[in-house]
Amino acid sequence: MTTIIPPSQTQGRIHSIETCGTVDGPGIRYVIFTQGCPLRCLYCHNPDCRTPHDGKEVTVNELITDIQKYRSYMEFSGGGVTITGGEPLMQPEFVLEIFRRCQNLGIHTVLDTSGYVKLATAKPILDHVDLVLLDIKSFDPEIYHQVTRVSLEPTLNLARYLSEINKPVWIRFVLVPNLTDPPHNIRGLAEFVSDLNNVKRVEILPFHKMGEYKWEQLAYEYLLKDIPPAPPELIATAKKIFQEYGIKVY
């Protein structure tokens, strides 16, 4: 006999929670960091989110009960709930149910994803998402693979689909000196984004080493230890390229 689990008791694995986040979508946000990621980004600042079986198991009910404690902050600031990771779309049923419950409560929802997922998996979740933060690590496929160890094409497929359904998107691009900064790479991404009709902004995130200590603790080899932070002039050059295509960039 098959046991049917009520949606409210749907379980998932999370790494951690940030109750007053301000960088993962508009306003003050309740940010859920899910466990598990198929990418192996060279600059990842959450390498401890990689393995799906780590972290802690929680139910949707537990999260919704906690989320509601912060509703006044969200409503005052125009914030809401963001699910990030790791890669949230590795736990589709769990993430869908959190977003569904949030929207039923009138809470704004944001999905932060690498886009490395089958469209069939993402589509039901997107019905309950108000804004997508789509991380496009590179536009040159070879650079993308060097950065992530996976293929770029699923991310571009998701970006095109989001444009088709006119789902609001913020594109995120991490600018890494001597890695993702070639002009053809930046320009290629700018051209691609300019053809989409739903992108509200592009965020250029300067490379930093804030997560390097986690790599050391996990005994992972951090290959970017000799790469300097992105200097202001490099960031300005990248922004100018996007602005040439009429894209709002931060």
Image: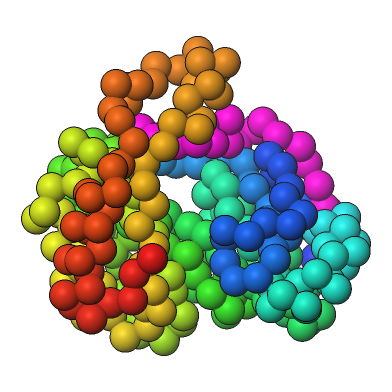
**Where is residue 167 shown, x and y percent of the image?**
46, 82
The vertical placement of 226 against 124, above or below, is above
Main SS type for the magenta part? loop
Could you say which is closer to the camera, residue 22 or residue 113? 22
Residue at image x 23%, y 81%? 246
Report the residue that reaches farthest toward the front: 233
Q: Is residue 134 left or right of residue 17?
A: left
Query: Where is residue 237 drawn, in percent x and y?
Result: 19, 57
Measured along the vertical axis of the image, is residue 56 above or below residue 174? Answer: above
Evaluate whether residue 194 shows in this view.
Answer: no
Rendered image quadrant of residue 71: bottom right
In the figure, 186 relative to 191: above or below?
above
Q: Quadrant of the N terminus?
A: bottom right
Residue beneath the point at 43% across and 70% down: 170
* Residue 193 placement (x, y as % from top left): 25, 73
Q: What colour scheme does the image use?
A: rainbow
Q: Quadrant of residue 39?
A: top left
Q: Please state the total of marks drawn on the protein image.
A: 0
Instruction: Give the residue at x 39% y 16%.
Output: 221
Quadrant of the image for the C terminus?
bottom left
Q: Is residue 160 left or right of residue 209?
A: left
Q: Position of residue 51 (x, y in %)?
A: 57, 32
Q: Is residue 176 visible?
A: yes
**Residue in front for this viewpoint, 59 or 240:** 240
Instruction: List the single residue furthest toward the left.
Output: 184
Answer with left or right where residue 227 lies relative to residue 12.
left
| Segment tinted magenta in the rendering | 41-59
Q: Residue at x 45, y 17 (%)?
A: 220
